Every structure is written in C-alpha cells, then in structure tokens.
Image (cartoon, rainbow, N blue to C red):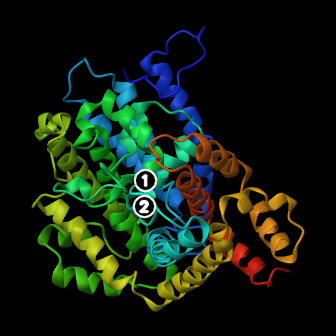
Amino acid sequence: MLSERQLPGPDDAEPETALAAIEADRSRIVQCSPVRRLQQKTQVFPLDVKASVRSRLTHSLEVKETGRQLALRVLTSMGQEVDKEAFVSLVEMACLLHDVGNPPFGHFGEVVMIDWLGTRLPSLFKQAVGKSSRQWPMLMADLQQFEGNAQSLRLLHSLQGLNLTLSQLAALQKYVRGAYQRKTGGRWQQKPGHFFSERSLVQQIRARFPTTTRGRYPLAFLMEAADDMAYGVADLEDAVDRGVLSLAELELALLSEANDYLKNCWQQAKVGEPGFFSRFRQAINDDLLILVSEQYLLHHKAILEGSHDGALLAVEQEPAQALQWLKDFAHRRVFNRREVEALELSGFAALKGVLEAFAPLLALPEREFTSLESRQDAKGLVLRRLYHRLPPRHLAAYRRDSRNAAFFESEREREWYFRVRLLLDFVSGMTDTYVLEEYRLLCGFQG
C-alpha cells in the first residue's frame, strides 16, 4: 500500500488512505528544516549572494515542477487503476528532496569528505577502538563512502524522524547498493544508495517493493530525468548572469559543435532579446517532456519489474543529445573557470578544516567520549566545547543508535560507527556559509 510507513501510528488510529498518507508526507517534507537549508547551499557558484543565481532550493523547486509535468504527461496514457494524485505527489516530493543530503559545496564537498575519511578514519579507529572484528572492514568501507543520495535517506528518516511512507522513501533512492556492499553488475550499483545505519529501513522497503532489491523504484526514473532537464540550461544561464561566461562564447561553441536540433532551438529563441533563456529552455524542455514520458511508457513493464537498467534520457535522440552537449559544455567551460575554482578552494579549506578540528572527538575511547561533561583538564575542556557544538537532534540519534542499532557484531564498533556518523551528519548538514563561519571560529577569526 502507498500509505505504509516503517513506524505505525497510534494503536487506536484508523488506517490512513493512500491520499491522506501522501498529503501528510507533503506537509512534513515542505516544512522540514533540510529543505529550508537548501536556500544556502550551492548549485554551481559556492557562497554566491546574488539573488538571481540559483541555490539548491531554487534548483529543487524547478526540478519539482519539471517532475510534476512529467508525471502528468505519463498519467495521460495510464489506466484508471493508478492513484493519479498520489503518483504526481510522490514524484514532486522526490524531486524536492533529491538534494537534501548533499554536503556544503555540493559534489565538490563530497569529494573533500571522501578524501578526508579515507585518510583519517583508519588511524582514528586504532586510537579509539584498537582491535577490529571480522565485520569491521565492511563497516569502515561504509563510513568512507559518503554520498549525498544515501545521506538524504538517513537525514529524513534517522535524524529528522519524518516517518515518510515507504513509497516516498523508495522514490528518492537513485541507487540500490549499500555503501557496505561491493559493486556488482548493473547501472544502479555505481554509487551507494544507503548506509549500513539504514539497513533495516531498506530491508523493509524491499520487503514492500521486492523489485527494488535489484532495480529502482519506478518513480525514481522520473525524478532523475527531471533533475537532468532542470540543470541542463540553468547552469549556463547562471554562468552568463554571473559574468563568467558570455553569450557570444556560448553561441560560438554551440553553433560550431552542437547538433542541428540545438542550433535551431538557439536561433528560434532569438538570442539577445529579453526573455531569451526562458524561451530557449522552454523549447528544449517541451521536447524533452515528450521524449522522457515516451521512454517511461515504452519501458514501463521492465521498469515495474526492476529490470530496466538505463536512464530515460540515455537515448540517441536529438533533444537528449542536445541536453548532453549543454551539460558537457558547462563542465568544460564553467565549472573549471578560475572564479568558480577559487570559491571551491575556500570551501575545501573550510570543510576539511572543520572535519580536522572535530577529529579529536573520534580519537577518544568510548568511555572518555561519553564522560566529556565531567572533565576539567585543559584538553578535556576544549573537547567538551567541541562536543557542545554538535546539534542536540544528532546527539540524540547517536545515543539511541549507538546502544540499540541492529546488525553489529561488536558493541564498541557500533558506538564508534555512530560517533563517526554523528560528525558526518553535523558537517554534511551545514550550509556553505555556516561551514565557513564555523571554520573561522575554530581558527580564532570570529569577531
């Protein structure tokens, strides 16, 4: 049922209808703090304060609208047995939530965190725990593979406790592999889709939707396509608005390299006239809406069975090829610009600096960490102040899971695993500006 949740309601409550459950999900999602924090997380230009340039929140709102249009178009060819309101809402909310687990500075931030985890965790574990169990290599591999999509699942369920429907959580997952599992064949294995800490939740999702054991939940295909469509033109529009790319540069490359379809869209949009980018984007998106919905319906049976292994836009058709050219051009000519890289270097220093500042909390044996409140020596006072900077909600999740989480062979390893998760939850949840402010404070530069 679409209304099924991991945690049931009160014993005396009547079972939710599908529509009531999905509406409750919408309310919880729109009002949750991770969505609000997206307004201060980067899309392309870190730490940018210019209102017209997209943040993760404005990008996610655009993805949500694109997802809604895709869902409505797909529904026109589906039977009456489909709950249409629930279908549209599930896609919309998956689109709105698709980036909530991203760390500060987006994918660049992910790379910084993964590098730090790979370098520092082994020695910190030896200091804090020492001898490892046979299970520990798997758990260490899990901790060292930070991924924004997997963090989204953890953030919404384990930290925020939103208790969303299993169908809504399933629609959010792009990948089927756990970070603790080795890669096998299949397109949806290249990145982790969940952490070991959410293993029991994923088992319940798979029990309810068995095809997600090997493939995606069907609506995740529409969410992914909506994301690709939304940023294809938008990143270039922001680059022009920001002044790191001129229309003349883009036009020269497009007219000499792109396919005839994209050239025609460019010329028909009347470059240089007011509203150009809006017309250009709309012309491409109109055709992409048709293409994506056709691909979804064409492969509908395989998608429902969990056997379809291709993105809906991974086709050799002109609109999809045009979108890919725009994305490739943005990576070649925008993301590598000196100005963008300079902003990312600021983010690198801040993010790595904050992680390193809190690393001593991971070097402590469990008893020392849990007794920080009583320490009065100079080192203990510093560590205690670091401990006090950790959010109460995250500390509560740490205390709960470090004592009771299932599937762990060693109690000491379970505690340390969730202590690392505590730090990662804290840092990945920071906005771009917050991590910079925290770094300045820890370096003694706070006014």
Residue pictured at 29% horizontal, 39% vertical: 217
Front residue of 21/130: it is 130
Front residue of 435/359: it is 359
Mark 2 residue element:
loop
Which numbered dot is residue 126?
Answer: none
Q: Check the image and report above or below for 368 versus 351.
A: above
In this rendering, does residue 97 appear at all? no
Q: Amino acid at mark 2?
A: Glu
Name the quadrant containing residue 71.
top left
Q: Rounded to the nearest whole Å, what is the CA distance between mark 2 and mark 1? A: 5 Å
Name the quadrant containing residue 325.
bottom left
Where does the C terminus fall, quadrant-wise? bottom right
Q: Relative to 175, is 383 on the left or the right? A: right
Q: Position of residue 380 (x, y in %)?
A: 82, 70
Outermost residue toward the right in this view: 376
Q: Are marks 2 and 1 in contact (CB under 8 Å)?
A: yes
Front residue of 393/330: it is 393
Q: Relative to 222, is 310 on the left or the right? A: left
Q: Amino acid at mark 1?
A: Ala
In this rendering, does residue 142 appear at all? yes
Q: Residues within 10 Å of mark 1 (few under 14, many from 20)?
A: many
Residue pictured at 72% horizontal, 73% vertical: 438
Q: Which residue is mark 2?
A: 147
Q: Which residue is mark 1?
A: 150
Mark 1 residue element:
helix
Q: Relative to 4, is 158 on the left or the right? A: right
